[in-house]
Image (cartoon, rainbow, N blue to C red):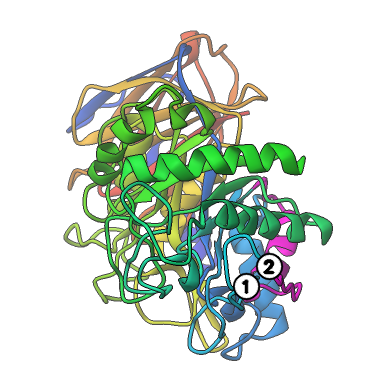
Amino acid sequence: MPLITFKKAFLLSALALKSSATPTPSTHVSVSVNPKIRFQEVDGFGVSQAFQRAEDVFGKYGLSKVNQTHVLNLLYDKDIGAGFTILRNGIGSSNTSDSNFMNSIEPTDPGSPTAKPDYEWDHYNSAQFPLAEQAYSRDLQTLYANAWSAPGYMKTNDDENNGGYLCGVDNETCASGDWIQAYADYLVQYARFYKESGVEVTHLGFLNEPQFAASYAGMLSNGTQAADVIRVLAKTIKKSGLDLKITCCDGIGWDDQEAMMAGLEAGPDPAINYLDTVTGHGYDSAPTYPLSTKKKTWLTEWADLSGGYTPYTFYENGGVGEGMTWANHIQVAMRDAGTSAFLYWIGAENSTTNSALINLLVDEVVPSKRFWAFAQFSKFVRPGAYRVEASSSNANVTVSSFENENGKIATQLLNQLGVDVEVSVQIASLKSGVVIHPYLTNNEYDLEALNTFKSGKGGSFQARVPARSMISFVSA
C-alpha cells in the first residue's frame, strides 16, 4: 500500500478507538461531558483582513486565481476549510491608501461637526468589501466593522495616528467643537454603504486598543468616555433603521477591558444597556476569567507578533506561535473566560511571520498549525452552539465540549503531556450506537479524519490520544 495510507492505517490502529474493552494504558484519563448543563452561546470564530491584508488574498503579491479561491475556501468554507463565521473589518480613517493605510469614507474635513459631510464610497474598501462578499457566499454569518480611529480632524491631536481623543468626550474639548454625533453618523454611514451594496454589517465598534497611543491609527479612551459615544451611537443607529449591534471596546488586554467596565456601567443611563457585546484582546493580558458583565464577550484580536515563523509546529517547546499554544488559548478563553467568540488577528497575509494563520509566499499557500488548531473548533462548533459542562481527571489533558443547534456534540481533547494517554469518555444523554467522528491535529497531521466508531452504553467510549496532540470527537 502507498506510504501515506500505511502511515494512516498504522496510526488508526495505534489510537485503538473503540467503545468497549478496557485498554491497559500507561496513563489513563477519565473525561465526563454533561450536555444538560449549559453555559454561554457561541457566536463563532474568525479573523480580520484589515490594513489592506484583504488585498493579499486577491493577488496583490502574486497569488494566483486558483490559490485565491483556495485561501477563501480554507478560511470560510466549513466543508473544505475552517469555516470561520466572523470577519472583522477595519473602518478606515485615512485620506490615503499608501502603505497599508485604510481609506476613510469621509477623507475631507467638512469644517465643523455640524457641516454636511462629503462621504465617498468605492465599493472596495481596501479589498475588504469583495472579501466580505466572498466570505458571505461561503459560511460567514457575522461581519464586525470596527474603527481603529476617527478621522484626525475629529480628534484632539488632529491626527488619526498617535493616540488622541475624540473631541467632545468627557474632559476632552476641541476648538472645532463636539464631534461625537458626527463620528456616530460616520460609523453608521459605513454600514449603510455596505448594506446598499448588498453586504450586511452586523456588529459595529468604534474603538481599538484605546489604552495604547500607537504610531498607526488609534484613539484613546476610558470607560466613561466610551460610554459618551455609545449613548449617541445607539440613538443614531435606531434613527437609521439599520439592524446593527454595538460592540465595545477592544481593550489591548483582557485586564484593560475589565478596567473599562465600571465606566460602561456607571450613571443613570448606563451605556452597557446599549451594548450587545463586550470585546477585548489578549496581548497585554489573556482572557482567563469572565469580564464583569452579563453581556456576551468576544476575544476579537490576538496573535503571535514576536516575528518568528513556525507554520509547521503544533508542539516543540510551547512557543508563542505553536498550534498547541493557540488550541490552549482558545479552550481557556471559551471555558474559563466564557467568551462567545475568538478571533485571531490576520487570517492570511503575504509574510513569513506568525501574525497570520495562513502564510502566503507569493503563490504558495501555507496553512499553519495555528490554523488547524482553530479549525478543530470552528469547523465543528457552529454559531448557536452552547458550551456544556466537561471535565478531565488530568489537568494536562484538557477538555471542552459544545452542543450544536442540530444536537451534534463536539468535544475537544488537548493532550499536553509528552506521552500517549488512554481516555475513557462519557457523554451523558448520548445514546449508545451513535457514530463518533474523531479528527486529529499534531506535528504530523492536520485535522486528519480518523476511523469512526460508535458510542457504547451510557454514551461512553474509549480512545488513545497521542502525546502533544488534539482530537475533536464529533457525534453524528
Q: Is residue 126 magenta?
A: yes
Q: Regarding mark 2 in the picture, which secondary structure is present there?
A: loop
Towards the viewer: 25 or 391 = 391
Q: Which quadrant would the C terminus be assigned to in this image?
A: top right
Please tell me the numbered disc located at residue 380.
none
Residue sitting at 62 percent across and 85 percent down?
A: 63
Chief secondary structure of the magenta span? loop
> How far apart are labels 1 and 2 at the CA level?
6 Å
The boundaries of the magenta stretch are 118-142
Upstream in the sequence, badge 1 or badge 2?
Answer: 1
Q: Which quadrant would the N terminus be assigned to in this image?
A: bottom right
Towards the viewer: 124 or 28 = 124
Q: What type is the residue that disc 2 sits on?
A: Pro
Q: What type is the residue that disc 1 sits on?
A: Pro
Towards the viewer: 280 or 358 = 280
**Picture layout, residue 154 above or below residue 279:** below
Q: Is residue 159 magenta?
A: no
Category of crowding for the residue at label 1, using alpha-carbon neighbours closer than 10 angstroms: few (below 14), some (14–19), many (at least 20): some
Category of crowding for the residue at label 2, using alpha-carbon neighbours closer than 10 angstroms: few (below 14), some (14–19), many (at least 20): some
Q: Regarding mark 1 in the picture, which secondary structure is present there?
A: loop
Residue matched to label 2: 117
Q: What percent of the width, then of the height, locates residue 444?
A: 38, 61
Residue sitting at 82 percent across and 62 percent down?
A: 197
Please tell me the numbered disc located at residue 110.
1
Q: Is residue 475 visible?
A: yes
Q: For this view, does 72 lie left or right of residue 166? A: right
